[in-house]
Structure formats: structure tokens, C-alpha cells
């Protein structure tokens, strides 16, 4: 039992050290993990531990004398909801970084695993400063965000073909795309602001000027944001187009049904007259017409009905309704 608990703890937490810089990654954190972290770093505030355990914190930067506490949000694919918020909590100081998340940020986990397994990769990523390491972590997650966005753009292109296909109904696909785009926009809007602030704050943990590195990340985020804005406008256009085409199709169907119903009115009127229990020419009480045989009255009723419907048909055609 203890062995299983130890394996689970090892799975949740790992530390890499290189040139005096340590990176601790904690997945699916329990309070005991953060309490142990607090023993190693007494300056960490308990409120930040509570924020790390929560999944609903607003992205922010808390500033302390020897470290920063950062909360960032990134999207994670979800089969039912398209994308969901995944929270990354970061403690960063001059010679350490602690990342806390709930095991959903696969690109960062892969980066951590590569640093563990490959000494050259570890030296490349962790050989400069904690500020540079944080840049690599955020840059990796933003690149993954770009890949997710490209999938959304691909889905928008697919919907474009379906919108103009009268045999296919696309309101559900459009609604799902709008939800995905809205989720990504909410994440990126906060990410733009937080990374911009972070560029100024994290420089104190590095002797190298990190402005260009973080500027590059900001450019990627701006690209994502602009693409999302374009995608939002495109989906809104498709939504309106689908509504117009659906309305036009419905109007055509209603027009055809209305014309068919209107042209059947003469036959209905004639049948109603001869269905009444009164004496009518050609009726059974007066005596059926036989000039054209035993079905003369029926022929007369059909001729009257067809002639009236024909006149209505010619009028509708002249008005351009057909």
C-alpha cells in the first residue's frame, strides 16, 4: 500500500536541477504536496497554495520580495465541450520555478520529461535563468494553442461548404464552433494582459535581457487573438447566411404548399355545394344530368374546378409567384 502511494506521489511531483536552477512540476496537487513545498520555501503564501488547488482562479500576478506567483489559463481539448480551461500556477524566483497544474497540460509535461531525459535539452532550456525557463514553458503552451486554433479554422472551412448545401443542416455545428471560439477568446484575452505584465516583472530574475523572448511570445498571442477575431466574424457571417438560406427554403416550401392549397379551394367549394342536403341541378333529387352519359354531373364538377384552378394558376404565374 505504501509502495503504491509512493509511486502516485512520484507521478504527481518531480524536480529537475541544472546549474543551480531547479524546476519542480506538481501534477494533480494535494494539499500535502503544497505543504511540503511550503516547508522548502517558507516565503510562499498559504493563499497561493489555495489558489493552486482551485481551478477557477482569475489569471493574475502576485508580487513578493523574492518571488512571483502567477496564474495562467490555457485551453485543453474536451470531447463534449470542445475546449475547457486548464489552470497553470507558477512560483518563480531567482533560482527556482515551481509549476502546479491538474495534469491536463500535455505539452508542458512533455517538455518536463524531455528535460529529465535529455541532458542537452536540459542545458538548452534551463542553462540560462528562471525567467528564460518560464519563457520556454509559456512559449510551448502558446504554440500548442496555435495548433488548437488551426483545428478550429479547419472546422470553419468545413462548415463553409455545408452552409450552402441545402440537404445538410448546420446550426449545431455553427453553435459548437461559436462556443469553442468564445472559450478560446476568453483565455487569450486574459493571457495577453498577463504576459504583457509578466514581461516587466520577470526581468529581475535574469541578467540577460528577456524582452525579445517575451515579445516573441506576445506576437504569437496577438496572432492567435487576431485569428480568433476573424474566426468569430466568419462564424457570425455563416450563422446569418444559414439563417437567411433556411428562411428562404422555408418560404419556398410554404409558398408551394399555399399555392397547392389555394388551387384546391374551387374543388372543395364545388364538393361542398353538392354535398349539402338541398336540391341542386344535376343532383340526385332533381335528377342527374345525362347529356354526356351517367357521369355528366361529375364531369361538370371537375371542369368547373379545373377551369377555376387554371385561371388562378395563370394569375399566379403573371404575378411572378410561380
Image: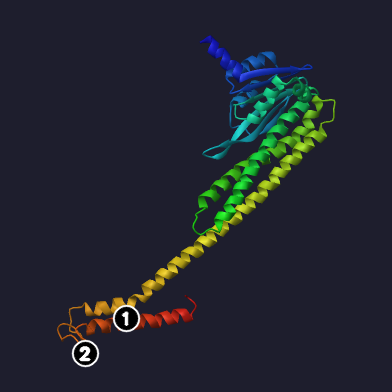
Kindly identify the residue that appears in the image at 66 percent across and 39 percent down. 147
- Under circle 1, the secondary element is helix
Q: Mark 1 points at which residue?
A: 305
The image position of residue 134, as x and y in percent, is 74, 28
Labelled pair 1, 2 in contact (Cβ < 8 Å): no
- Under circle 2, the secondary element is loop
The image position of residue 273, as x and y in percent, is 24, 80
The image position of residue 307, as x and y in percent, is 35, 83
Residue located farthest toward the front when viewing the structure as drawn: 293
Q: In this view, does 301 lie above or below 142?
A: below
Q: Is 143 displayed left or right of 216 in the figure?
A: left
Q: Is residue 148 above or below residue 209?
A: below
Kindly identify the residue that appears in the image at 60 percent across and 50 percent down. 156
Q: Which residue is at the front of the view, 279 or 87?
A: 279
Kindly identify the residue that appears in the image at 73 percent across and 21 percent down. 118
Kindly identify the residue that appears in the image at 64 percent across and 24 percent down. 100
For mark 1, does the 10 Å Cα neighbourhood hold few (<14), some (14 to 19), or many (20 or more) residues?
many
Q: In this view, does 264 lie above or below 153?
A: below
The image position of residue 304, as x and y in percent, is 31, 83
Write down the quadrant of residue 152 in the picture. top right
Write down the quadrant of residue 121 in the picture. top right
Q: Is 204 displayed left or right of 253 in the figure?
A: right
Q: Name the residue under label 2.
A: 291
Q: Tell me the CA gap for discs 1 and 2.
A: 19 Å
Q: Is 290 displayed left or right of 265 in the figure?
A: left
Residue located farthest toward the left when viewing the structure as drawn: 285
Amino acid at each position: 500500500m505504501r509502495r503504491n502511494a509512493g509511486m502516485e506521489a512520484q507521478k504527481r511531483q518531480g524536480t529537475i536541477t541544472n546549474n543551480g536552477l531547479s524546476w519542480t512540476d506538481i501534477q494533480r496537487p494535494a494539499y500535502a504536496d503544497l505543504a511540503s513545498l511550503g516547508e522548502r520555501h517558507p516565503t510562499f503564501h498559504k493563499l497561493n497554495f489555495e489558489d493552486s488547488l482551485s481551478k477557477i482562479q482569475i489569471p493574475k500576478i502576485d508580487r513578493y520580495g523574492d518571488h512571483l506567483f502567477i496564474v495562467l489559463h490555457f485551453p485543453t481539448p474536451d470531447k463534449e465541450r470542445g475546449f475547457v480551461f486548464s489552470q497553470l500556477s507558477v512560483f518563480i524566483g531567482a533560482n527556482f520555478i515551481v509549476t502546479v497544474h491538474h495534469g491536463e497540460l500535455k505539452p508542458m509535461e512533455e517538455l518536463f520529461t524531455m528535460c529529465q531525459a535529455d541532458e542537452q535539452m536540459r542545458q538548452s532550456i534551463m542553462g540560462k535563468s528562471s525567467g528564460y525557463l518560464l519563457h520556454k514553458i509559456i512559449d510551448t503552451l502558446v504554440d500548442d494553442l496555435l495548433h488548437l486554433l488551426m483545428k478550429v479554422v479547419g472546422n470553419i472551412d468545413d462548415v463553409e461548404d455545408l452552409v450552402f448545401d441545402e440537404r445538410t443542416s448546420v446550426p449545431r455545428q455553427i453553435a459548437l464552433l461559436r462556443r469553442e471560439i468564445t472559450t478560446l477568446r476568453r483565455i487569450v484575452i486574459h493571457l495577453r494582459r498577463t504576459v504583457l505584465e509578466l514581461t516587466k516583472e520577470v526581468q529581475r530574475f535574469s541578467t540577460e535581457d528577456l524582452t525579445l523572448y517575451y515579445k516573441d511570445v506576445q506576437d504569437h498571442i496577438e496572432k492567435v487573438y487576431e485569428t480568433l477575431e476573424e474566426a468569430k466574424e466568419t462564424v457570425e457571417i455563416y450563422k446569418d447566411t444559414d439563417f437567411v438560406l433556411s428562411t428562404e427554403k422555408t418560404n419556398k416550401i410554404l409558398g408551394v404548399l399555399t399555392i397547392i392549397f389555394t388551387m384546391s379551394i374551387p374543388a372543395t367549394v364545388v364538393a361542398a355545394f353538392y354535398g349539402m342536403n338541398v336540391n341542386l341541378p344535376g343532383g340526385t333529387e332533381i335528377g342527374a344530368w345525362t347529356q354526356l352519359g351517367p357521369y355528366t354531373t361529375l364531369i361538370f364538377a371537375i371542369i368547373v374546378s379545373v377551369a377555376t384552378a387554371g385561371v388562378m394558376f395563370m394569375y399566379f404565374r403573371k404575378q411572378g409567384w410561380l
